[in-house]
Amino acid sequence: MELTPISQWFSKPIEGPLLISGPCSAESREQVLETARGLAALGRIQVLRAGVWKPRTRPGNFEGAGEPALGWLREAKEQFGFLLAVEVATPEHFELALKYGVDLIWVGARTSSNPFSVDQLANAMAGTNIPVLIKNPVYPDIDMWIGTIERFQKVGLTKIGAIHRGFSPFQRSTYRNVPKWEIPIELKSRIPSLPIICDPSHIAGRRELLKEIAQKALDLSMDGLMIESHFNPTVALSDARQQVTPSKLEELLNSLEFRSESVANPEYLNRLESLREIIDSIDSQLLELLAQRMDVAKEIGEFKKKNNVVIMQLRRWEEMINCRVEQGETLGLDPEYVKSLLRLVHRESIRQQANIMDRKNDSEKE
């Protein structure tokens, strides 16, 4: 089924990238209206968003104001002319959203990871054809993401888009959620008519990283941005570090380059750029993994030092080389390439462990 372009989702056509903004959570009437007033002054935000029901990782944190927040958002819509977007996780949430005139629904990462919840929501939305944006699952599972999209298609919805909000990292990372740009790129490759917008706020986790992520998304021809804004982020009840004031959001938007597609064989240029972005993303992950591997090597060095064991373990090295070369061959990698790469990695591990041994010797001399 061909999906409807974002430009045709609403009664008033959307021109250019879809720009969605608003607080992480609707906390009070004053907060919603003050933030909406600031965003309206920008003249660029088409959709006002806010969390009404907030599923938190642990209980006890602010979990949203519920139905009263929908009343505040409806007031902001009537006063400033915004379209409204909220997250829903249950059919009851959806029915309340419709009651208060919400124009756009999004499905959160936790919900999109649960096919049972998705089925319930999709069945509740059948027959409405309300626009729905589906965030990627918490973990990098593109088939799960596609499956969620297909469940909404199955009930007849055509105004469907995806939100790239990054994936929970297993190890330490620069970002709150690792972008893994190759996954939304692959998603677009599999479903070319699917609009994809980016949520830099949840990828970054920190406002100072928003620009680089937003620009990357635009350079990848994503169809819009969802950026969290609060009239006073310092007092926000949720995700304070990733929200910006409306004035700071204006500065951010003005700093971004909204590039047009090249007319010189755009299919070739877009595909080339997509492949390069995949390489950049993989290289970034490789560097993070190498750093994690070196941390483990250092820990091994400390352990050897405490137990008075030599650095070089020849048998272990030979077993590792043979095992990795064999694994590399099954993945289509040249054995000599694998050996050369592992030698470089091993050399650095030996150097790090030697430094640890040297520090021990220096302390003994003192």
Image (spheres, rainbow, N blue to C red):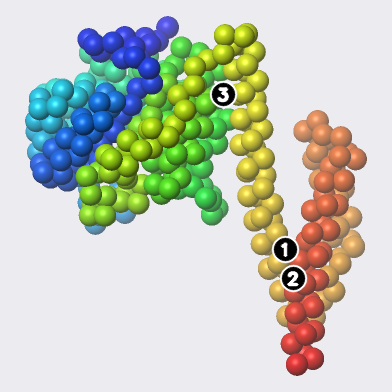
Q: How many marks?
A: 3
Does the CB distance between marks 3 and 1 fall below 8 Å?
Answer: no
Q: Which residue is mark 2?
A: 301
Q: Position of residue 237 (x, y in %)?
A: 23, 52
Q: Which residue is mark 3?
A: 186
In the image shown, does 299 or 245 lie closer to the viewer? 245
Q: Residue at x 90, y 40 (%)?
A: 336
Q: Seen in the image, is 361 located left or right of residue 52?
A: right
Marks 2 and 3, how far apart at CA: 40 Å
Dot label at residue 297: 1
Q: Position of residue 332 (x, y in %)?
A: 81, 30
Marks 3 and 1, how far apart at CA: 34 Å
Q: Mark 3: give few (<14), some (14-19) or many (20+) Cα within 10 Å.
A: some
Q: Mark 1: give few (<14), some (14-19) or many (20+) Cα within 10 Å.
A: some
Q: Mark 2: give few (<14), some (14-19) or many (20+) Cα within 10 Å.
A: many
| Amino acid type for the residue under numbered disc 1 | Ala
Residue occupying the far bottom of the picture: 366
Does the CB distance between marks 1 and 2 fall below 8 Å?
Answer: yes
Q: Secondary structure at mark 3?
A: helix
In the image shown, does 25 or 130 lie closer to the viewer? 25
Q: Position of residue 335 (x, y in %)?
A: 88, 39
Give the mark nearest the N terminus, 2 or 3. Answer: 3
| Amino acid type for the residue under numbered disc 2 | Gly
Q: Position of residue 178 (x, y in %)?
A: 51, 42
Q: Seen in the image, is 66 located left or right of residue 139?
A: left
Within the image, what quadrant is residue 225 found in? top left
| Amino acid type for the residue under numbered disc 3 | Glu
Q: Residue at x 63, y 43 (%)?
A: 284
Give the mark nearest the N terminus, 3 or 1. Answer: 3
